[in-house]
Image (spheres, rainbow, N blue to C red):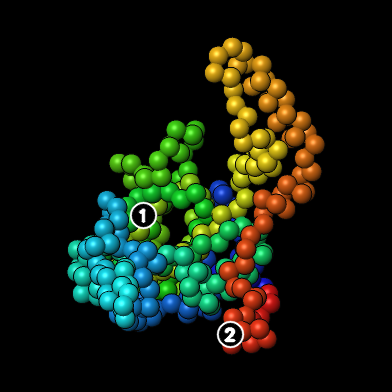
Amino acid sequence: MSWSDIFADPADRERLEWGREHLRFTASTATTSLLSFQRIDDWIRYGQVRYPQFQVNMPEGGVPPTMFTETRPYLALSMPGYPVTAAIAEQLRQGATLRLVGIEDWYRPVAELADRLAETVGADITTYAFYTSPGDGGVGAHWDMADVFVLQVEGTKKWNLWDIPGGTDWQDNQTLHTDQDPDHVIELTPGDGLYIPAGTGHRAFAGPEGSLHLSIAVSVTSHRKIVRTLLEELMTAIPLLDRLPVDGDRLTPIAALLREVAEAADKADPAKLLTKADRRERRISEAPLIPGVDPAGHRPF
């Protein structure tokens, strides 16, 4: 049951008000145990990740990779984006957050988790880890396009949340510019979880021992993606060199094109359109490097 990857009690899923209200819950120990301060330290110290798999962020934005990585010679080649532990530590001392990006692309346990959740909710799953020094909040106030599940792994973190505002003007920029006090303040300790609906403004500050949390971003198929999928199908039938005339009547061909769009929408099968829009590649490949040999012991979900 994939909801047990997020919730200690999968029944908590029934308390979710998707896209409307945040929710505090008890996180799954099976998932929080996938990360630790020590594991993150080892990934950096022994060069097991490369930029941009890891990034360093200050509240005002990302730190240039030249400030915390180097290019190392390797045989006759070079290896860019190699982490420099001392430089990263210095950035953290100055208030930065170390962010691990797209963990499902390079760490099998998280890839398995992402595949299970994607199959359950029909959504794209992206995972991040945030490693923050005591008292710091190295990522500025912002809102995300995806719904986010925060699972606190080690240390504590205090979350400031701003409710989703009315209207649409605020959607032009995901950076949150507000002098208002947060609508909610929630402190997470190890084993706590927090659901943050897409569009909810948030910023978090690490407690006195620092903080490590895993964020699971769930991007459900949007109305825009449905429309985009429909138009992509229509565009395959439009010759590449068809264009409006340079002079003369330009409105008539536009009107004809709009009629084609309307007819395509009218004839579209909603179920087939949804299936195509929902199609996602699994993170765990079923193809072994050597035919008949699967050292990782692939397990279908």
Image position of 36 (left or right of 263): left
Image position of 68 (left or right of 42): left
Q: Is residue 214 above or below residue 183?
A: below
User: Circle 1 sits in a helix, a strand or a loop, which is it?
Assistant: strand
Q: Which residue is mark 1?
A: 203
- Residue with the most extreme top position: 248
User: Which image quarter: residue 40?
Assistant: bottom left
Q: Amino acid at mark 2?
A: Ala
Q: Is residue 138 above or below residue 73?
A: above
Mark 1 or 2, nearer chain start: 1
Query: In the image shown, does 227 or 127 lie closer to the viewer?
Result: 227
Disc 1 vs disc 2: Cβ atoms closer than 8 Å?
no
Mark 1 crowdedness (10 Å alpha carbons): few <14, some 14-19, many ≥20: many
Mark 2 crowdedness (10 Å alpha carbons): few <14, some 14-19, many ≥20: few
Image position of 160 (left or right of 229): left
Q: Is residue 156 above or below residue 165?
A: below
The quarter of the picture where the N terminus appears is bottom right
Q: Amino acid at mark 1?
A: Arg
Question: Residue 205: image x %, image y %?
Answer: 31, 61
Count the numbered circles shown.
2
Q: Which residue is mark 2?
A: 296
Q: Is residue 101 above or below residue 177?
A: below
Query: In the image shown, does 294 or 26 lie closer to the viewer?
Result: 294
Residue 251: give its label: none
Residue drawn at x 68%, y 41% as measured from the top left: 236
Residue drawn at x 67%, y 64% as measured from the top left: 120
Residue drawn at x 66%, y 38% as measured from the top left: 235
The residues bearing labels 1 and 2 have C-alpha atoms spaced at a distance of: 38 Å
Question: Residue 284: image x %, image y %?
Answer: 59, 73
Question: Residue 58: image x %, image y %?
Answer: 27, 57
